Image (cartoon, rainbow, N blue to C red):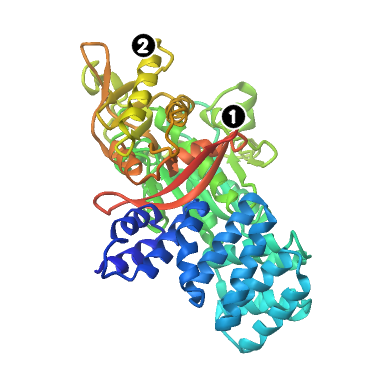
Amino acid sequence: MDSVKQLEDLVNHGRHLEARELAFQIKNDPDIDLLRVDQLLALSLSKSGSPESALAQLELAYRRNPENPETAGILGGIYKELFKKHQDSKYAILSRDTYAKNFEITKSYYTGINAATMSAIAGRARQGREIAAQVISLIDEGTRDFWELATLAEAYLLTKDRTLSADCYIKARQMAANDWGKIISVFNQLWLLNHYLPVSREIMRVFSPPTVVAFIGHMIDHPSRPTPRFPASIEQEVRESIAGAIRTMNGGIGYCSLACGSDILFVEAMEQAGAEVHVFIPFSKSDFINASVGFAGPQWIERFERLCAKFPTTFITEDKYLGYDDLFAFQCRIIFGSAILRSLAYHQEPMLLTVHSETDLKRREGGTRDTLRLWPLNDRHFNVNPDKFVSSAIVPPPANPVSVPSLQSDPSKLDGNKLERPVLYLVQADLSLTPGMEKEKIYKVINAKLKEEVITYKAFDMGADSIFMAFDSETRALEFVQDILQAAQSSSQLENNVKIGMHAGPAYLEHLPSGENIVQEGENISILRRISRFAPKGTICVSDHFAALLALNTKKFKLDYSGVLRSDDEAETRGIYSVTVKY
């Protein structure tokens, strides 16, 4: 595959950070299609949260090729992103003018409808109606193309023909089915338009994304449980209650685990509703079955295996359980944060659905109660209480559990007392592009803080061009990152050249005779290093797991999606976000 095709492939698959690096590498090739590289580089910069850099990249290419619809479309979109980001009308006008000039030349309905919409947003409603009318004349009324229908619907909306607009929007929505990419694209455009001209509630509702639901709940009672809480005999009642709650809240996207009992019932109910589900498992499949599924009987294992094969399943670690219960709490926080992250993209708030004994809550018992404290949206929670079904149920003797090997429950047995595997919050600062004097200043600041014991860490390693730190919380990790960035910003350099990567997950921590700790190589260290390698200069880039943790406090952190990043062996894809700390 030639380099431009490779670049297009990276962009088309959302691998924007990798695309940026490749584009900068090939820009100076004299035999390359430089305009196409500039287009793709600007697109990647804009879609990965850097519209300012994208603008600087593409403006010159546009001035050289104003008639190219692809260049104009991308540049108009960059101006639109800058307008949405800064709410500065000058960007709305620049976006409108860029789209309009190209539409005059090419009569492309894509640049035409954007010119019409941005005209309305920029306060030129009459000009917007005139352009929208021209766009309508370019598209066959009987089209069965989704984007043409959506364009017609928007054009009719701008010309105030609400009946035809609604008809086209409904047809487009029917064609989209469960293609959330198309649905969200139209919804976000309607959401923006609704700030400047009225969009009917009916149309907003047609394209409104389904509610994102985070789920946690009790497992089927273990055979050793002395007091019934969720006996197998109330499965049907709990199932129906979960399904009813999903219908009531219009749940269409779910985040959960897959233990026997409530988790599996939730996923089966979402499956029956035709919904999208994302499953998180805290450790290796075999150990999870042993710990959280098999004791309830073989039918639960069969249901687990089927659902695990059908829906996207993320393992927090592929390693064994080894008695590290912190993985369960970590998994829950990722489930909650992932649901919040997904909803942020839809301008909505998610719901938390639980199956939780209110008796346990009153007695201050149960792990599910503890996890409820992690959910930040108290008014967005619905609970199915199994107590009301238990009181009238005939509880049969416990089912014969599947015979499973015992799980190691003492983490200290991992390797005497020299090796642990806690969840760690990891930072890698790449200083390879940082000038010598600036680098020396950063090292001086960090070493001084280490000497004064201001930085509380679990392990660290400083190389000639990098700083690695491991912490016991994401808060401490971010405080350290801010120390690095402040040291870099206080230098005389005009540009911050530090590249920051952050990730969280279980890692092997070795205790040295000197009293220091080191983190051994492993899957999560590899992920961290890849993130820092592709992070843009002066940017904090974090994995989807780390972003999910930060999403639990959106008042303090702003998270911008930056695309996906493949592992070195191309076997795994992870979402990447850029982080801004709100002051």
Q: Position of residue 14 (x, y in %)?
A: 41, 59
- Horizontal side, residue 530 vs residue 217: left or right: left
Q: Which residue is mark 2?
A: 451
Secondary structure found at label 1: loop
**Residue drawn at 45 percent across, 58 percent down:** 57
Residue 220 in view of the camera: no
Question: What x and y, as percent, mark residue 516?
Answer: 27, 15
Residue 100 falls left or right of residue 523: right
Q: First in sequence: mark 1 or mark 2? A: 1
Residue 342: percent from left, percent from top: 54, 50
Residue shown at 67% from the left, 63% from the top:
93
Identify the secondary structure beneath mark 2.
Answer: helix
Reading the image, the residue beneath label 1 is 373
Answer above or below: position of 106 versus 263: below
| Foreground pick, 269 / 542 | 542
Amino acid at dot 1? Arg
Q: Is residue 349 above or below residue 493?
A: below
- Residue 390 seen from this side: yes
- In the rendered image, residue 257, in percent from the top left (x then y), is placed at 46, 44
Give the answer, above or below, for where 574 lies relative to 140.
above
Crowd tier of the residue under label 1, counting other residues whose Cα lies within 10 Å: few below 14, some 14–19, many 20 or above? few
Q: Are marks 1 and 2 in contact (CB under 8 Å)?
A: no
Q: Front-most of 330 and 181?
A: 181
The quadrant in which the N terminus is found is bottom left
Using the numbered discs, state the Cα–Cα distance from disc 1 to disc 2 in whole angstroms: 36 Å
Determine whether 395 is above or below 457 in the image: below
Tell whether 433 sits left or right of 142: left
